[in-house]
Every structure is written in C-alpha cells, then in structure tokens.
Amino acid sequence: MTKLTLDRANKKIWGVCAGLANWTGMDATVIRVIFVLATLFGFGSALLIYVALGLILD
C-alpha cells in the first residue's frame, strides 16, 4: 500500500474517495457508492468523515 493522500487527478469533489481507492486498491466508484450509502443510512456521519479527511489529508 502507498501513503494515504488526496488524489487530485481523479477527484470529483476533493479527491478523498479517489485517494482511498488508490490506497486500498479498490475502484473509486465503489468507494464513492459506499460513502453515499453510508451518508444516507448513517444520518450524515460519513459526510463529516469525508470533510475531516479532506481537511486532514495532503
């Protein structure tokens, strides 16, 4: 695995999901769907995690 960073080349909003996809070796679309479902069913807690990762990661 590589270092967890934002992927600015394949980003949609901040590059968090693309960075997580590169770090885990998964497809970015799968990570994005997981974040959307987690936001809908987790009452927005995944959105807070997304924002935190966007601000923390370089």
Image: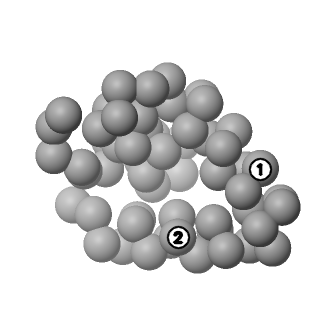
**Residue at x 63% of width, y 68% of height:** 47
- In the rendered image, is residue 43 in sight? yes
Q: What coloring was used for the rendering?
A: one colour
**Residue at x 48% of width, y 45% of height:** 17
Please name the amino acid that badge 2 sits on: Ile
On-image quarter of the N terminus: top left
Secondary structure of the residue carrying tag 1 is: helix
**Residue at x 60% of width, y 29% of height:** 29
Q: Nearer the viewer, residue 33 or 8?
A: 33
Neighbour tally class for label 1: few under 14, some 14-19, many 20 plus, Cα within 10 Å: some
Is 12 placed left or right of 43 in the picture? Answer: left
Neighbour tally class for label 2: few under 14, some 14-19, many 20 plus, Cα within 10 Å: few
- First-in-chain label (1 vs 2): 1
State the CA–CA distance, disc 1 to disc 2.
13 Å
- Residue 50, horizontal then vertical, whole percent: 52, 64
Secondary structure of the residue carrying tag 2 is: helix
Is 22 placed left or right of 37 in the picture? Answer: left
* Residue on which disc 2 sits: 49
- Disc number for residue 37: 1
- Residue 32, horizontal then vertical, whole percent: 61, 41
Please name the amino acid that badge 1 sits on: Leu
**Residue at x 83% of width, y 60% of height:** 40
- In the rendered image, is residue 9 in sight? no
**Location of residue 14 with respect to 53 vertically, above or below:** above
Where residue 19 sits, quadrant-wise, is top left
- Disc number for residue 12: none
- Residue 25, horizontal then vertical, whole percent: 35, 26
On-image quarter of the C terminus: bottom left
